[in-house]
Image (cartoon, grey):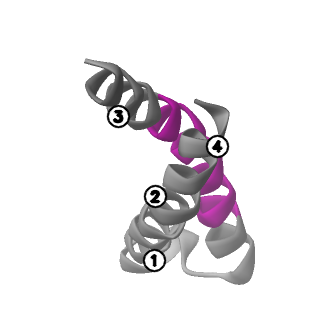
Amino acid sequence: MLKITALVHVMTMPVLMGMFVIAALSIPEFADSQGIILAAAIGFVVAIPVSWFIGSRIWRARRA
């Protein structure tokens, strides 16, 4: 299951990082370089449990 989760993480990580960076750019207080880096880091961290959830669902569907 770890391989599936890693592959899903590679796909979900840039999507979530991009969403958080776009959100940071739309807020003037976070539109500096530190805010963008922080938003990308938060997107990376949030992608871990999301990938784990999606990977486990794929694993269970594959085994059924």
Alpha carbons under labels 1 and 3: distance apart = 39 Å
Q: Residues within 10 Å of mark 2 (few under 14, many from 20)?
A: many
Please name which of the two marks, 2 or 1, marks the residue nearer to the observer: 2
Alpha carbons under labels 4 and 3: distance apart = 11 Å
Dot label at residue 28: 1
Q: Is residue 59 above or below residue 34?
A: above
Type of amino acid at the residue the image marks with label 4: Lys
Dot label at residue 58: 3
Question: Which badge, 3 or 2, is on the more N-terminal residue?
Answer: 2
Closest to the observer, 10 or 35: 10
Question: Which badge, 4 or 2, is on the more N-terminal residue?
Answer: 4
| Helix, strand or loop: magenta stretch | helix
**In screen coordinates, is 44 left or right of 14?**
right
Q: Secondary structure at mark 4?
A: helix
Q: Is residue 43 above or below residue 1?
A: below
Question: Which badge, 2 or 1, is on the more N-terminal residue?
Answer: 2
Type of amino acid at the residue the image marks with label 2: Thr
**In screen coordinates, is 5 left or right of 12?**
right
Alpha carbons under labels 4 and 2: distance apart = 14 Å
Please name which of the two marks, 4 or 2, marks the residue nearer to the observer: 4
Say which residue label 4 marks. 3
Circles 4 and 1, Cβ within 8 Å, touching? The answer is: no
